[in-house]
Image (cartoon, coloured by chain):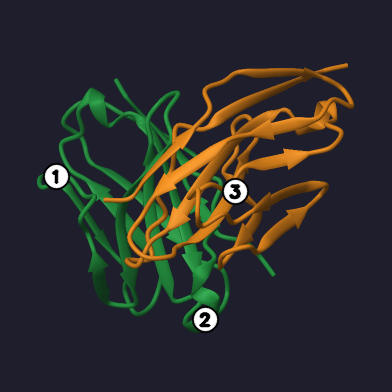
Amino acid sequence: NAGVMQNPRHLVRRRGQEARLRCSPMKGHSHVYWYRQLPEEGLKFMVYLQKENIIDESGMPKERFSAEFPKEGPSILRIQQVVRGDSAAYFCASSPSGVAADTQYFGPGTRLTVL
Amino acid sequence: GDSVTQMEGPVTLSEEAFLTINCTYTATGYPSLFWYVQYPGEGLQLLLKATKADDKGSNKGFEATYRKETTSFHLEKGSVQVSDSAVYFCAPRGAGNMLTFGGGTRLMVKP
């Protein structure tokens, strides 16, 4: 059973460009979470999605950031007009529904570098 | 909101030494508690969890007990190995399903 997949693993963008980060949850998982890790820091929650719904986006910056989890295909975290401060590792996690939703499984992350 | 306090690292130990990494948290209600481990350049791996008071989570020789009265979830291992060198994160999972992470504790084990 494949784990959580993220791509690309490394992404380099120049200031002002757009970054698209993809996350495919584990098979059978319908909940997706995005976290951001700044250098030498812990992870900070950004957004929680279920298929076609944003459940909690309290950790998302108000501007330039958006996330979706369509009925078909991976979840996408989109950052428009990137700035140097967006440089970080972005991790996706997934969990199943029901009681087992307690545990989140993480992908390998996408390391975004903004030049 | 929820918060986590972990002992600051790095923690440097010799192989076969006893390990304790302290973790205390504040959260609404009675959250599930998790320890994750992050090896260099990788994502987080679930190490162990506990879902209610007095539960003990264990995996690969690591243990942690859910202490409701002290809101703590300290990680212990009786004999560390060089391969245990990594960053360890304590994280309660609150009512909103999100995990709240502390700053992590870097463990370095010397041969």
Q: Can you identify the residue that label 3 sits on?
A: B35
Q: Which numbered mark, 1 or 3, is in the foreground of this view?
A: 3
Q: Are marks 1 and 3 on the same chain?
A: no
In the structure shown, which secondary structural element does the residue marked by tag 1 occupy? loop
Q: Is residue A97 above or below residue A58?
A: below
Q: Residue furthest left?
A: A63
- Judged left or right of residue B59, residue A110 is left
The residue at 81%/49% (across/down) is B60
Q: Can you identify the residue that label 1 sits on?
A: A64
- Judged left or right of residue B51, residue A89 is left
Q: Residue furthest bottom?
A: A98
The residue at 37%/65% (across/down) is B29
The residue at 45%/32% (across/down) is B103
Q: Residues within 10 Å of mark 1 (few under 14, many from 20)?
A: few
Tint applied to chain B in the drawing: orange
Tint applied to chain A in the drawing: green
Q: Can you identify the residue that label 2 sits on?
A: A99
Is the residue under label 3 in contact with that under label 1 (CB below 8 Å)? Answer: no
The residue at 24%/26% (across/down) is A85
Is the residue under label 2 in contact with that under label 1 (CB below 8 Å)? Answer: no
**Which amino acid does the dot numbered 1 rest on?**
Arg
